[in-house]
Amino acid sequence: MLYFIVRRLLIIIPTALLVVTVTWALIRFAPGNFYTGEKQLPAAIEENIRKKYGLDKPWYQQYLIMIGNIIRGDFGESLKYQGQSVNEIIYRHLPYSATIGILAYLLALAVGLTTGILAALRQNSFLDYTSMAIAMLGISIPNFVLGPILVILFALGLYVLPPARWGGLSNLVLPVVTLSAIYAAYIARLTRAGMLEILRSDFIRTARAKGLDEWTVLLRHALRGGIIPVVSFTGPALAHLLAGTVVVEKIFAIPGLGNIFVQSVLNRDEPLILGIVAFLSILIMFFNLIVDISYGFLDPRIRYE
Amino acid sequence: MKTISLVSLFILGCLSLSCSSGAAGRRYWGKTEPPKENVLRYISGSEPESLDPQIPTGQPEARILMALYDGLVEYHPKTMEPIPAIAERWEISPDGTEFIFYLRKNACFSNGEPITAHDFVYTFRRGLSPELAAQNAYLAYEIKYAQAYNSGEAFVKDKNGNFLLRRDYKDTGKKDFDSSGFGPDTEFHRFINSPARLTVPYAEKELEAYLKDNPQMREVLKDKELVPVRAEDIGVEAIDDYTLRLKLELPAPYFLDLLAHQFFRVVHRQTIEKHGNSWTRPENIVTSGAFKLAVHRPYDVLIAVKNPEYWDAENVSLDRIEFYPLEEQTTMMNLYKAGEVDALYNNTVPAPWLDEIRKYKDEYLDYPEATVQYYTFNITKKPMDDVRVRKAFALAIDRFALAKFRKTAKPLADFTPEGIFPRYEEVRKRVYKDLLKEAGISEEEWNRRYFDPQKACRLMQEAGYEVVSKENGRCEVKNFPLGDVSLTYNTSEVNKAVAEFIQAQWKQNLGITIPLKNMEWKTFLPFRKRLEYTGIARAGWVGDYMDPNTFLKLFYGPNNDSATGWHDQKFDQLMNRANSETDPEKRFEYLARAEFYMLQNQPVIPLMTSATNWMKKPYVKGMYPNPGTLHAWKFVYIERDPAKWDRDVNEDLLKREDPMVEAKLAKLMKTQLDFQKRRRGE
Amino acid sequence: MKEQEIVKGTSLWRDAWKRLLKNKLAVFGMVVLSIMVIAVTVGPAIIRWATGYTYDYIPPESELVRSFPPSLKHPMGTDDAGRDILARVLQGGRVSLMVGVISTLVSLIIGVSYGAVAGYFGGFIDNLMMRIVDIIYSIPYILIVIVLLSVFGGPNTPGFIKATADIFGGGQGLSQIFLLFFALGLVSWLTMARVVRGQILSLKNQDFVMAARATGVSTFGIIFRHLVPNALGPVIVYATLTIPSVMLSEAFLSFLGLGVQAPYASWGSMVADGIKNISIYPWQLIFPGVTMALTLFSLNFLGDGLRDALDPQTRKF
């Protein structure tokens, strides 16, 4: 087990570098440059810019310089936001996204797990149908619709919550609810499906036959196996939530990483893209590792050799 | 299932009801209470790229930088004409190529150090240095040798130590202007007024490319020494600590307007040299404007507080401006309605909302803007290489219907925006009359150039297409090569709506359905620039300064920025003549001729002049819908007495006199006006 | 022996079909979806024949170029350009349904086989395959789509995409839409692969797999005949979740200018446009929104029914 963890941790760095390489190549394939704008630049000015940022060097030299800096942990300065280092931008904007993301995920877990388990236990009951229908509603109402509707109701209709921007606790309510809706719905559905699967399996029957009381069966045996699909889903979902979700950040004007990431791609801000991508890939791999480890705890049938 | 849809319908019903009932009785849109403090909360658009005034190119940055930095002159809050700022007065040489600025002695940076003419010299040289690689550097290219310095060029020196002169080797159509008698005589002044020296690229690669294009120069450059153009060679001179002299290449009457641009606003040398790239961080930054940076949380807020060291601090009304970098229209409208912000930037009210928003007459600002929207033709590819086809496509768009559909724009058939340059428009009207007579175009036909389907059909027929007439003058073109043409635009809701509308127009009037193609911004720009598009592409142009030249120069020169492939000697000659002309009236005449000539070739389809299209709360005063939506922040104030709030702002706000603003303006203008009077008296 | 029953495919499918028909909600879903498919297939032609409106018809009379509420002439009202929303909803349905189905199929095919193989073999292969997933997962999909569309858009569109687009009428706009379908499919199989792998990991040490292995069933057979069918429950549920998510991704990409070409619409883009005007012209949101929600609901009921019907273990209850 320990060997497994160490090996996976070690592989994170080279994988991240591979991700950076692929992304770098993609940026080179994408048309346009960070300085392309509506007003075309005189050739001389463009030349000045290319010289200043080393874009006049051959591509392999540029690649080696870039990857060398990244190995040393230096992602350089943003091309768009001059004088700001990439590390600083990530460090500054991560907390916003993380706060909203973690809160939203906790809310989604609480709502999703409860409804999912209840629905599975009372399969085909009214409760099952209603909660699954609501979950489906959560999935079919995109957050760019849910957000504005909540704003109109609570911020512009009742004037009880602020419509947007970062600030106090009251500013957090609407974005967190908007963001969590779809995750809660996913979790509810995945929990229900996983629980149904497990409840029918032999070992649950055995447990029941042994005369264990229903709650013990449920919590100690069924739930552990039943939430495996939820766990697989959680790894990448949480990584993405931490790194921000563009739509909610845009609607509520939250200075999170997600919006900055999308902007950096649209701006072709190479160092910033690479920095966030590297950060994101490490985050995803780390969470996936945790997910894989937890498989072993949740389901004794899974072994890592 | 049923219950859910009922519930959702109910919610939707409430949503629409709550809004419409809210709109009915009230005078103002949403919550309208002045903020408790003396603060303006302003939505400023995208996050500023940099707080270095010489780096960013966008309008969102310009608005913030105008608060933080001061220049020689400032924009008039209503007309955007130059008004005195750090320069308390100035004079222009008779030939229009030299300016002398007399700086006020009490101007200082936010750290208390005085601002002198040397700081301006430093600022101008820095902005043009190739190492800074400023995108805006081209704005200063009118300054003598500025372009050469910025492009890394060199003078050519012969064996005797004499420099070769431009007039002997290059036929640029540019004259030499000598104003050596203007102002005190200095060594530099003699140098800068001597005939323009020849400049050629200095770097080997570029020089080689230059010689390839100009083979006759190879002989000329033999045994000659190349002397790089230095920062010290450009036409900027500090005569003494408080007198600054600029020398331009050509008389450019608009250059004074341009000096209010953030690119020319003064920066603090020691700070920049000490901190390098990080000088704009809140802990390092030293500014020169009416406000100074207090807080900068990117993507969240930028707070500028009143600068007590500012020379005109007593006339600054606001204690603080909070800039919120936001682009999402719905979000900003929500914040505005909830009373969390006081004003928006331009082009922010979504068109479908306008029927509703226009009811709030005290808040919505609809004035012409110095921005044109147009479509370009790729004239290097068939079938758009035929001017008749281009004209047909231009005439088959009902500009009036388009303007009505967009709700905010004015129809445009010329290239310079309508209602922005009244003096130019007067001259143009007169010139056009003569030109029409020459060209044999009746006035009636000319007036139909906003929409003339009959003529469009006729032109298509003349161009050799099979045309079937339909009712009310419309037609169907049979054998148009649809596969070779598309209409490409960069994605935005507005561009999409306009493209769909125009597609329908061509379908109805010419029976041609041009396929649409949208592209992400950065993919679109090189695609259009390199003329890879087929047929038609979208474009827009925001004027840099208040002169038609900023629009017409788009078509000037062989590698012009029009992205059409159109280039014409005659047009260039007219532009050269205009820009060597010192008499403003005659200059406009040449410009009008150039505009007419260009449009007769129809490399573009002008569509509309944009409108300012923004909102402010009625208690925000001293903030005007000027053509660039650039606000001189020291005039802005919060009025707490509802009786004095702005009313019916869409009628004539620009003509109304606000005693507060007028008093400040009169005081500022006095130095320059007195000076002019004195001069005239001499 | 239950395993042998599974191998006898025909009876299994017939059984499943019977069980599906017993599930009222699933039948409801099927009926609604069938109606929807028929409506979007023939609907636009009927509307055009009956009223003359098409999805891109902007009236020449400038006073008609604005949003009108529902009326007899326009049962769903008109949009900002005066276009009939009903015609647009029907046309948009074509795009959205195809986005959902094609992209989900692409992601199903890639995701299930990939995840199953990785989960079954475990060890080094699993490790390698999952790291590849991690890599692709970490690359911003907007960047992938930008590059795909700019490299393969226009003249370089791959032949099979053009061919598919030609079946539906062809043209530049359609080619880009189909390119988009594949691009979305190519980026959305990753989670599917992880879900399947998780399932397979927990199934592969069970008795029936041991039994199959002991009786000499080939590796391919074990994975695709024994393991995958047993993991189908979560897969189908996840697939029904993928359909809405790709439809919404499409809307988001349209918003960035990488999605459906105007004047074509999709439900996602219509909803995205409609929400902005909700307080002034609510019909712009309600009709496409409700149609889309109804479709997704039906898809979901059908998916649930299929899951129950296909699940070999259900019969024990």
Image (spheres, coloured by chain):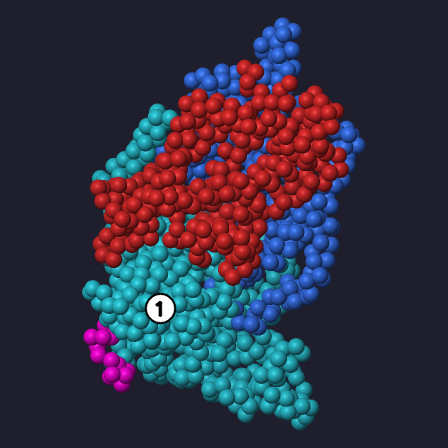
Q: Nearer the viewer, residue C172 or B69?
A: C172
Instruction: Tell me if I can see residue B47 in this picture.
Output: no
State the extent of the magenta-drawn residues as a range.
B434-447
Q: Which chain is blue?
A: A
Is residue A94 in the magenta section?
A: no
Indicate the chain on which mark 1 is placed: B
Q: Nearer the viewer, residue B436 or C176?
A: C176
> Chain C is shown in which shade?
red
**Residue located 71% across and 29% down the image:** C217
Q: Which residue is mark 1?
A: B479
| Amino acid of disc 1 | Asn
Query: With respect to residue B574, does B271 lie above or below?
Result: above
Residue A49 position within the rendered picture, expressed as x and y whole percent measured from the top left = 60, 66
Q: Quadrant of the C terminus of chain A?
A: top right
Q: Main secondary structure of the magenta part?
A: helix
Query: With respect to residue B66, does A277 lie above or below?
Result: above
**Residue located 33% across and 72% down the image:** B465
